[in-house]
Image (cartoon, rainbow, N blue to C red):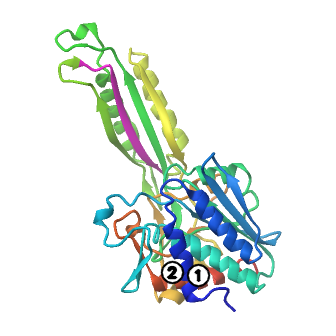
Amino acid sequence: MRAFTEEQKIKILEDLVAIKSVNENEIEVATYLKKLFEEHGIEATIVPVTATRVNLVAEIGSGSPVLGISGHMDVVSPGDVSKWSTDPFVLTEKDGKLYGRGANDMKSGLAALAIAMIDIKENDSLQKGSIRFMATTGEEVGGAGAKKLYEEGYMNDVNTLIVAEPSQDVIVYSHKGSLNFKVTSKGKEAHSALPQLGYNAIDPLAEFITKVNAEVRDSNRSNEILGELVMNCTIIHGGQQVNSIPELATAEFNVRTIPEYDTEEVIEKFKQFAEELNNEGADIIVEVTMSLPSVFTDGKSNLVKTAQLLGEKYFNDKPELIGSPGVTDGSNLLRSKGDDFPFIMFGPGLTKMAHKVDEYVHRDVYLKFIDLYEELFLEFNK
């Protein structure tokens, strides 16, 4: 017996897409899901993160084992709406595809998790243990929601974690971390004809960039699954006009880390290079604006094997097992878990469709994932 008809399942996704949770406003998504759960006898708790942002936690069953299922409630901006062929906040079906901002990344995954859990509750089919639903805020920028759940102990007793990011054709069991830096170099303004009266803020910043490129980006360390660390200086600002010595220059970096060269070591390197240049007369400040560690698991768990078999059952093709260069909320949720922890990222939609104009999820994929999740959840709570 199913708690929802196909059309009701589509309506839930339609309602979620209509909520403009663009890097904010997750409260409305959380309130909607809380009401949905409570209509089916499932207690749900809104967990404040900031004055305007929240997580949502709901749970069925009791005791161990505890299966964690997670998805984020925020979406990225639709950008130039005139480039969309449909209204990005109105779920629109065309040729078997459901279009809308977040339809792919990742409100279809979030809805599929919730519906599968409600079905299990309605049918009283959970034989033992618990399923903990964790909807997060701010995943697209910084991961504050998942960090809050980790800090408040919601992952302490979790034995298995499924993150429903769009990845219908692959199962991700490890992924790189992500670090953002803002590096500020302070100088002293002067006329460019009299540079000795000032201090050019660009010069030490350029030297800093050269140092980190040589010693961090060009490292030969690698991971068997994730490959090498990736680092890019992506934004540079400096100076006001061409005939003035600049008193301020900034550079921003994004680093995709691996366990062999993870976030703490990279942060220490950045600070070390700044200190070396400061000892030579520079005034460089390193600010870490985001820090998400890499996630490495060995991929040998029954979770991975079962998800692969179910992927083949529902989609007639066994999903490939991969490590990903992107990050998920797993970076925060799994901070204290070991390499043998059962973790996957597996959900409706395609990774390549994330953040794009005319984002969509296939209708049949969304609906099949609800059934797939129900089987998968119950397999680990027998």
The amino acid marked with disc number 1 is Ile
Q: Position of residue 239 (x, y in %)?
A: 27, 25
106 relative position to 86: left or right = right
The amino acid marked with disc number 2 is Tyr
Instruction: Answer whether residue 318 is visible to the viewer in this image.
Output: no
Using the image, tell me which numbered label, if any, was put on residue 161.
none
Distance from label 2 to label 1 (Cα)?
A: 7 Å
State which quarter of the image contains the C terminus: bottom right
376 relative position to 83: left or right = right
Q: Position of residue 277 (x, y in %)?
A: 40, 21
Residue 319 in magenta stretch: no
Using the image, tell me which numbered label, if any, was put on residue 366.
2
The residue sitting at 64% across, 49% down in the picture is 49
Above or below 88: residue 366: below
What's drawn in magenta, residue-wise? 245-257
The residue sitting at 73% across, 78% down in the picture is 40
Residue under pointer 1: 370
Q: Position of residue 154 (x, y in %)?
A: 73, 57
Q: Residues within 10 Å of mark 1 (few under 14, many from 20)?
A: many
Furthest residue to the bottom?
1
